[in-house]
Image: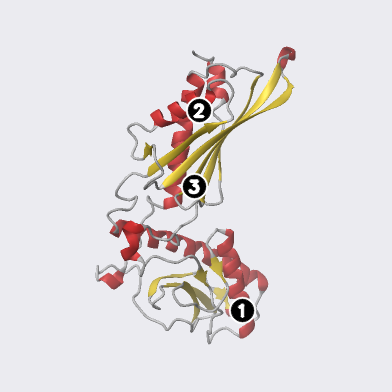
Amino acid sequence: MKRSFSILLSLSTMCLLSGCLSVPHPFSHPGKETQNLTDRTATSRLDVPVPKDEASGDAVSKLWAQQVTEALLEQSVPAIAQPVRPGDWWLRLHTERRGDVIVPLYSVMTPKGTIRATQEGPGVPVADWNAANPDAIHTASIFGAGQVANTLTGIMAQDMEDDPHSLKHRGARIWFQGVTGAPGDGDVSLAQAFVAAFRGMKDSIQSSRMDADFIVATTVKLTDGPEGTHGHPLQHIRIDWRATDKDGHEVGIATQLHDISAHELDGMWGDVAMAAAGEAAGAVEEMITRYSSRDAKPIPDTSKGNGKKTVTPQTAAPGTGG
């Protein structure tokens, strides 16, 4: 059964709702296929110890560490302002004085105390830095946290590049739990159309949770709306396509919203289901791509002797914080 072109357009409003979409995920616990990467893949948190930096007094050091931690948390990086704990990746905050400015440096450290990558922020006037100027420290911390987040994304991308079983080398396996709450034949037709939309894509739908990388569940909700034109009542329809990873962590929610004529979808959905599901399939693929960082540019690990100089192989004792 075909629906009008206006109805097909009416379901085209798509919102991607998730704080995780643009966030690196180098802290995910490795699955059984990647246990050999546990010495390089970060754990569930990033420690941010107070730096013991000669160019910074105690007040500056404490404020800087706290501000960087808060800025990282705002980007959904699980940072904790605490001394380095065994087995944790951590962030070494340090500085260099160059003329009349202090240059903040951010080194991502492995649990073994190896510098995995270092980024530097824009210089801060010495007077502002030494005086613990709140605005200057806050601005530096925001910029530094963005650099660290990008670095973590690149680290994960490199680990994925090195792992032949990662999503850089294969499509994601998706377990689709189906659709609930739709009027008419929507539960069935939406589900069938969503599965069909993945044919030919790199990612694939499977009928079992076993070995699935991601899980998608869909809910439909109808609520009464105001009277439309010419006194015709309307209904508000919301379709949520919620994706989680295999451990139940939120990946994102793709939401379709619109007002439709009341009871217009009480029967067969037809082309409406195909249009909505096709759009949702693209959104789910985008969420998976962003969440997994599979398209991110890798940061090569020079400690493996590849000759590239995007990181500097040095060591520092974990727990020194400086």
Across and down, in percent, residue 79 comes to 54, 67
Q: Earlier in the sequence, mark 3 or mark 1?
A: 1
Residue that appears at 29% across and 49% down: 169
**Residue 307, position in %: x, y?**
25, 69
Q: Residue at x 45, y 57 (%)?
A: 25
**Foreground tag (3 vs 1):** 3
Instruction: Evaluate whether residue 74 shows in this view.
Output: yes
Whole-Å distance between the Cαs marked 3 and 1? Answer: 36 Å
Query: Disc 2 to disc 3, how far (Cα)?
Result: 20 Å
**In the image shown, does 262 or 308 lie closer to the viewer?**
262
Residue 132: x, y in percent?
Answer: 65, 78
Residue picked out by circle 2: 276
Q: Amino acid at mark 3?
A: Thr
Quarter of the image for residue 135 reads bottom right
Q: Which residue is mark 3?
A: 244
Three-letter code, disc 2: Ala
Is residue 300 visible in the rendered image? The answer is no
Badge 3 vs badge 1, beta-carbon distance below 8 Å: no
Q: How many numbered badges does the structure rendering display?
A: 3
Q: Which residue is mark 1?
A: 62
Q: Earlier in the sequence, mark 1 or mark 2?
A: 1
Give the SS element for disc 1. helix
**In the rendered view, does 161 fall on the left or right side of 93?**
left
Tell me the tag on residue 322. Answer: none
